[in-house]
Image (cartoon, rainbow, N blue to C red):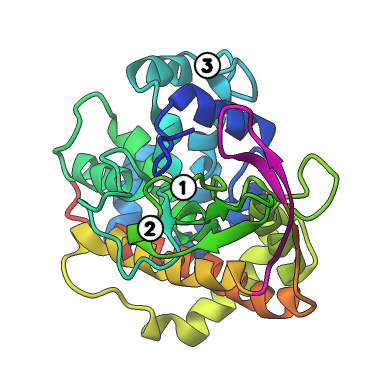
């Protein structure tokens, strides 16, 4: 993965993505938040989306970036898609674009922080905005930028795509979570919860629990069309309190800060057990046990984060000064 602080090898990142469930927030979650955002587009934003996409169906592009990542391995629905293959050739490290590794004690995301990267999810969401406004990386089309923004706003609201566990492993093999950003430089991390296992199954890990299990428990469904109205009702009730402040070009930084705050709750009360060491250093996995009230606390939090991602996606699409 990364140096002790950051995951920088794209091949490792992509391999990890292939080993874990395919879709952060699950396909259901990404599509549901996009449906909720679609309902809240301004007329002007909708007209620009339709001009670029051919419709206002944001859900149809909500997981394109994940499908592109799978296409790197010639897997998934875009395995032989010329555009996806070209995108991976142009941007072979795009697996890094979906997350940022912030220690849980981080007070606020900063573009120049040691745990930030020029290619992390915040930077790339802001790059997508630049492209949609006529600037940015000229290799990225407006359609690709729209796909990126729809997906990455979802990703950055998933707490484990931002907050990350760093661990000190004692001589007795006991894992201790370290949250102080100043103390993690030489410590191994859990890859956003991907290395924390609550059961014996391949996908019995904390990250997948947030990606899929908690999403499905929100409305007892795997159907995005059923979940979306649940998110829309929460947006209608609470959205006025979720307005972002300042220059919209930097809103993703605020949203990432909110996610690391939520990640502290995602890790709260976890008990750390057996550590499987990595022969190359660090660890491969740590067994965890959930506190008894984990779902009671985290289902409402996950739902709020997902609803906020839909609200904030519409908010930034409405704010953009679209290129003609």
Cβ–Cβ below 8 Å for labels 1 and 2? Answer: yes
Question: Compared to 93, does 226 lie above or below?
Answer: below
Name the disc covering residue 81, or none. Answer: 3
Kindly state the secondary structure of the residue where label 1 is placed.
Answer: loop
**Of tags 2 and 3, which is closer to the observer?**
2
> Mark 3 packing: few (<14 Cα in 10 Å), some, or many (20+)?
some
> Mark 2 packing: few (<14 Cα in 10 Å), some, or many (20+)?
few
Kindly state the secondary structure of the residue where label 3 is placed.
Answer: loop
> Mark 1 packing: few (<14 Cα in 10 Å), some, or many (20+)?
some
Task: Measuring from the top left, give residue 152's x and y in whole percent.
Answer: 42, 48
Residue at the location (32% across, 48% down)? 125
Screen quadrant of the C terminus: top left
Tell me the quarter of the picture where residue 182 sits.
bottom left
Separation of marks 3 and 1 at Cα, in angstroms? 39 Å
Q: Looking at the image, can residue 41 be seen? A: no
Name the disc covering residue 183, or none. Answer: 2
| Residue extent of the magenta highlight | 269-286
**From the viewer's perspective, is 285 left or right of 249?**
right
**From the viewer's perspective, is 19 left or right of 65?**
right
Task: Measuring from the top left, give residue 132's x and y in whole percent.
Answer: 23, 43
Separation of marks 2 and 3 at Cα, in angstroms? 44 Å
């Amino acid at each position: 993965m990364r140096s002790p602080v950051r995951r920088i090898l794209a091949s490792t990142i992509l391999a990890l993505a292939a080993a874990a469930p395919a879709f952060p927030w699950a396909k259901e979650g990404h599509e549901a938040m996009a449906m909720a955002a679609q309902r809240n587009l301004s007329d002007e934003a909708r007209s620009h989306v339709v001009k670029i996409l051919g419709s206002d169906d944001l859900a149809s592009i909500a997981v394109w970036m994940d499908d592109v990542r799978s296409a790197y391995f010639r897997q998934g629905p875009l395995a032989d898609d010329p555009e996806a293959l070209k995108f991976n050739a142009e941007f072979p490290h795009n697996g890094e674009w979906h997350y940022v590794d912030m220690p849980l004690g981080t007070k606020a995301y900063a573009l120049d922080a040691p745990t930030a990267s020029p290619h992390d999810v915040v930077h790339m969401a802001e790059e997508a905005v630049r492209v949609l406004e006529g600037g940015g990386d000229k290799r990225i089309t407006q359609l690709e930028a729209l796909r990126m923004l729809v997906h990455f706003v979802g990703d950055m609201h998933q707490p484990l795509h931002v907050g990350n566990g760093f661990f000190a492993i004692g001589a007795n093999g006991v894992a201790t979570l370290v949250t102080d950003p100043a103390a993690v430089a030489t410590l191994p991390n859990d890859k956003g919860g991907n290395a924390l296992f609550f059961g014996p199954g391949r996908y019995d890990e904390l990250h997948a629990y947030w990606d899929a299990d908690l999403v499905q428990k929100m409305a007892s469904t795997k159907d995005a069309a059923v979940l979306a109205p649940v998110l829309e009702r929460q947006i209608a009730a609470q959205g006025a309190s979720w307005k972002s402040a300042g220059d919209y070009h930097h809103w993703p930084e605020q949203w990432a800060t909110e996610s690391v705050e939520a990640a502290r709750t995602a890790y709260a009360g976890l008990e750390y057990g057996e550590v499987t060491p990595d022969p190359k250093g660090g660890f491969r996995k740590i067994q965890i046990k959930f506190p008894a009230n984990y779902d009671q606390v985290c289902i409402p939090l996950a739902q709020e984060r997902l609803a906020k991602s839909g609200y904030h996606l519409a908010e930034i699409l409405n704010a953009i000064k679209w290129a003609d």
